[in-house]
Image: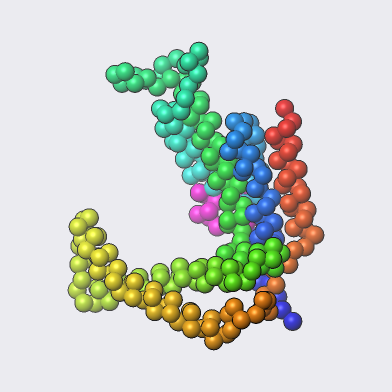
Amino acid sequence: MAAVWAADVRPGWLRRHNPLATLAAPLPAMLALVVVHDTRAALVLTAVAALLLVTGAGLGRRGLLALLVAAPLGTLVLGAALGLWVAVPADGPGRVLAQVGPLEYTSAGLAAGLATAVRLTAVAVLALVGGLTSSGPDLARAMQQQLRVPYRVTWTILAAFRFVPRLGHEVAVIRAAHRVRGGDEGPGPVAAVRRWVGWSVPLLAGALRHAERTAYAMDARGFGAHATRTERYRVPWRARDTVLVVAGWSLTAVVLLVP
């Protein structure tokens, strides 16, 4: 019998959904905002996605500050910067807000830049609905169990996800070893380059050793010998996952199609 899925006890109701559902629900909105220049729809979808993250993602204090404070401020800064580069209608450039030599910063450019920034922020916040509420291993397992992706692909993805924390641990060990031996830890860009050059060779050697051990372990367990394999963890698709996807797609259609 498969073990209980660990996400069933995680904080935040969105984290207890199938990862494919939390990715599929906002996907049409993300694709539509790439081609549809509708600032009102972008604002509405951003607000809905932010509400989902606040209530269902189990964010901590830093996550809430980043979502509710840093994201709006970043949108304003990005919009003001994009106002210098976006195309402005020739028949309605608006009034000049600032001028440096031949370069003019107009109200129409600012409005166009803010509209573009709002759409980019909307796509980013919608992507966080799936990115912050699911893990890479769970997504790989769901792809194998629901989408019938071959386990050779999903297990390769799982092995790649395991490499990231392993390499982080290797960097910490190498840095501690260099400090014990009196390595160059001084300030400045030259010292930083020296540190990274000194870390690169042992880090590469450690990565190769880990890859070799992973290959031996997978061979010992008969990886690739059979068409299917048993799974220790099941990532179920439940009725609430279907409801989430249908609700997300319906909301996207209403926001984009209703004037």
Q: Identify the image quadrant of residue 205.
A: bottom left
Can you see residue 8? Answer: no
Q: Quadrant of the N terminus?
A: bottom right
Give x and y (percent) for residue 230. Answer: 68, 79
Can you see residue 244? Answer: yes
Magenta range: 54-66
Give x and y (percent) for residue 83. Answer: 44, 28
Q: Report the residue at 48% width, 15% height from top.
A: 90
Asked whether 55 falls inside the magenta stretch, the response is yes
Asked whether 12 falls inside the magenta stretch, the response is no
Q: Report the residue at 67% width, 76% height from top.
A: 227
- Nearer to the camera, 184 or 11: 184
Which residue appears farthest toward the right when viewing the image?
A: 239
Give x and y (percent) for residue 80. Answer: 44, 31
Q: Main secondary structure of the magenta part?
A: helix
Q: Quadrant of the C terminus?
A: top right
Q: Identify the image quadrant of residue 237.
A: bottom right
Seen in the image, is 24 located left or right of residue 111? right
Which residue appears farthest toward the top when viewing the image?
A: 91
Does residue 32 sit above or below 100 in this rendering? below
Q: Report the residue at 55% width, 57% height from top.
A: 60
Does residue 161 sit above or below 28 in this rendering? below
- Nearer to the camera, 250 or 47: 250
Q: Report the residue at 73% width, 41% height from top.
A: 251
Seen in the image, is 214 located left or right of residue 20? left
Does residue 36 sit above or below 220 in this rendering? above
Q: Identify the image quadrant of residue 146.
A: bottom right
Give x and y (percent) for residue 213. Answer: 45, 82
Q: How is the image coloured?
A: rainbow
- Nearer to the camera, 191 or 210: 210
Q: How many marks?
A: 0
